[in-house]
Amino acid sequence: MTQAFELLVNEEGKLVLRRPGMDDVVDVRLRRAFPWSQRDRFISVRDAEGKELLLIEDLEPLESGRRKTVEEWLADTSFIPRIVAVDDVDVRFGYQQWKVRTDRGPAEFRVQEREDIRFLPDGRFRIKDADGTVYEMIGLADLDESSRRAVEALV
């Protein structure tokens, strides 16, 4: 069971962990232990050096304000663009050039190897581009027809 805590944003814009009977820890970081399979469970609260201070086992039972703080902080600090539409995939010379729309705007990237596209158990896909950026793509059933046609042969 998760211990009592508060997460606050101070006047400098840094996240502060406050626990009863302990000193406040300024500039804590939040990390998902299982970002692909259990996004709302096992959130690690770490100090600036990376030492885990607290593990939030599940966001669901948290009071709504605290849960909102965690969700917003993770959204702002986790960079995994979510592909919501595929405009084009051009296959040539052994690589794929993708033109997509993400939840963070349009993107264009190159995928070197077929193994860089991984199917996730819930139907989503994990795509790693040639520069090492990781994208999440919603399931094929959730894509529009044009996007599905663009990627079905590749996955």
Image (cartoon, rainbow, N blue to C red):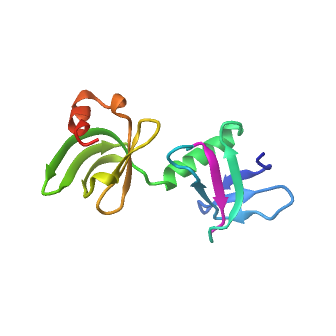
Q: Residue furthest right?
A: 21
- What residue is at 67 percent from the left and 40 percent from the top? 65
The quadrant holding residue 20 is bottom right
Q: Quadrant of the N terminus?
A: top right
Q: Residue furthest left?
A: 93
Q: Which residues are magenta?
A: 40-48
* Residue 25 placement (x, y as % from top left): 72, 64
- In this picture, residue 150 sits left or right of residue 75: left
The quadrant holding residue 23 is bottom right
* Residue 43 placement (x, y as % from top left): 63, 51
**Main SS of residues in magenta:** strand
Is any atom of residue 45 visible in this view?
yes
Relative depth, front residue between 86 and 70: 86
- What residue is at 49 percent from the left and 46 percent from the top? 36
Q: Is residue 46 part of the magenta span, yes or no?
A: yes
Q: Is residue 41 part of the magenta span, yes or no?
A: yes
- What residue is at 38 percent from the left and 37 percent from the top? 138
Q: Is residue 135 above or below residue 26?
A: above
Q: Quadrant of the C terminus?
A: top left
Relative depth, front residue between 8 and 39: 39
Q: Is residue 99 above or below residue 123?
A: below
Q: Residue furthest front?
A: 115
Is any atom of residue 10 visible in this view?
no
The quadrant holding residue 143 is top left
Relative depth, front residue between 150 and 82: 150
* Residue 97 placement (x, y as % from top left): 20, 52
* Residue 51 placement (x, y as % from top left): 67, 67
- In this picture, residue 78 sits left or right of residue 106: right
Q: How many marks?
A: 0
Q: Is residue 29 above or below residue 127?
A: below
- In this picture, residue 93 sits left or right of residue 105: left
